[in-house]
Image (cartoon, rainbow, N blue to C red):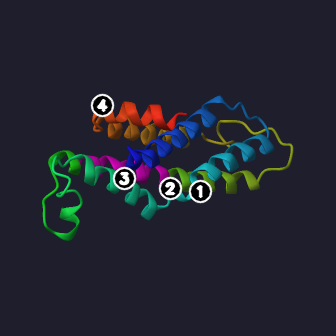
Amino acid sequence: MELLQPILTVERELSSVDQLLHNGKPTTKEDYTSLFQQTQDILSQSLFDRISFKKAFNAFADNIYYSDPDQANLYLGGGAIPKTSQSIAYLVRNDVLTGVEDMRAEVQYLLKELAKKNDGETVSVSEGGVDLEEIFRLSRTANGGMIKYLELVPPKELEAGRARFSQ
């Protein structure tokens, strides 16, 4: 259950990004800048760094799919073959990670575009304004990937993890 905590933290933070993006009603350059800086702050956490992200997900996935605890992590040394469910988990994990990395890049791009605007200027979400469709799509993709990943977790373990870490 301890190994699930970082994954549930990723889920919570990605959900926060999605809520932030969809609940904000920015109109000015400052509003948009604040929104994207908050998004960037969340996505810049160390848990979203490629190596940390993969380690957290692998530590969990490598252990939950083996009924024999002596086999857990054995394949990392070349001694066992990952099960199909592990391979699916790795693919979904990589999709989520790609979504996070793409969101980071999109936020940086949007912040650069906003820097070209005048302070206090009303910014439209249209031609010549700020296009939010890509960041919305990336957020949906990353959050959808988290849903798919957590569907692979044994239900009782997921329920216990949510109960423990939501406190």
Q: What x and y, as percent, mark residue 56?
A: 40, 55
- The residue located at (45%, 38%) in the rendering is 143
Please state which of residues 124 and 53 is positioned toward the viewer in this rendering. 53
Callout in the foreground (2, 3):
3
Q: Relative to 81, does residue 134 appear above or below in the rendering?
A: above
Please, what is the dominant secondary structure of the magenta stretch? helix
Tag 1 or tag 3, which sits nearer the N-term? 1
SS category of the residue bearing label 4 = helix
Instruction: Give the residue at mark 1.
Output: 44
Per the rendered image, the range of residues in magenta is 88-101
Looking at the image, do the residues carrying marks 4 and 1 touch, with CB atoms under 8 Å apart? Answer: no
Q: Residues within 10 Å of mark 3 (few under 14, many from 20)?
A: many
Mark 4 or 1: in front is 4
Which of pointers 4 and 2 indicates the residue nearer the eye?
Answer: 4
Q: Are marks 4 and 2 in contact (CB under 8 Å)?
A: no
Marks 4/3: CA–CA distance:
17 Å
Name which residue lies at 72% across and 36% down.
Answer: 124
Kind of residue indicated by mark 3? Phe
Q: Which disc is residue 155 wearing?
A: 4
Number of other residues with Cα within 10 Å of mark 4, as a class: few under 14, some 14 to 19, many 20 or more: few
| Circles 1 and 2 in contact, beta carbons < 8 Å | yes
Which residue position is annotated with label 3? 57
Question: Label 4, label 2: how many angstroms apart (C-alpha)?
Answer: 25 Å
Q: Nearer the viewer, residue 120 or 50?
A: 50
Q: In which image quadrant can residue 24 be found?
A: top right
